[in-house]
Amino acid sequence: MDDFKPQIVAFCCSNCASSAAKVSHGMKKALPDNIKLIQVPCTGRIETLHLLKPFEEGADGVYVAGCQEDSCQYISGITKAAKRVKQVKDILEGLGIEPERIDVFQMSAGKGQEFVEVANRMVDTVKGLGPVPTA
């Protein structure tokens, strides 16, 4: 499993998380190249189906990166996203797939280092799980 390179999709809020990603780039902090970033206006707009689709298309892990709860310009974006991530965890578990393959993180716009750390943590977690089991 040492050569396993998990494919991970990250849904990023266009305000905080995407800004943190830009800061990380400016700091010359490289994201793992096996993470696909998808910018969304607000994590609260992400539906359960959006979170499941990457798994259907072969991703090994998914995470949502959004604003701190008290910083969301749409008020409850990260709270809604966290509820949907929980729903997907339950669905994955029901299918015999590890729920740790999906997670949600809150971050501030200026935290480029934190953005990279979250990405690396997610890669490490999913790498430890191995490829998604297939039926």
Image: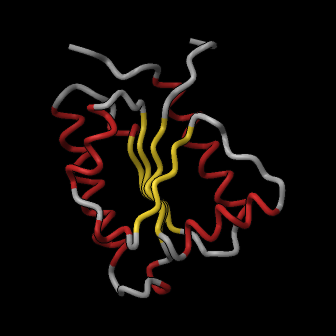
Q: Residue at x 60, y 75 (%)?
A: 108
Q: Residue at x 42, y 30 (%)?
A: 60
Q: Give the vertical position of 79 relative to 95 (above or below).
A: below
Q: Residue at x 37, y 68 (%)?
A: 43
Q: Give the vertical position of 75 relative to 123 (above or below).
A: below
Q: Position of residue 28 (x, y in %)?
A: 83, 54
Image quadrant of residue 23? bottom right
Quarter of the image for the N terminus: give it: top right
Q: Position of residue 124 (x, y in %)?
A: 59, 34
Q: Residue at x 33, y 63 (%)?
A: 82
Q: Give the vertical position of 45 relative to 5 (above or below).
A: below
For residue 45, side relative to residue 130 (left or right): left
Q: Give the vertical position of 43 relative to 127 (above or below).
A: below
What's the colour scheme? secondary structure
Quarter of the image for the C terminus: give it: top left
Q: Position of residue 9 (x, y in %)?
A: 45, 43
For residue 52, side relative to residue 41 (left or right): left
For residue 26, side relative to residue 81 (left or right): right
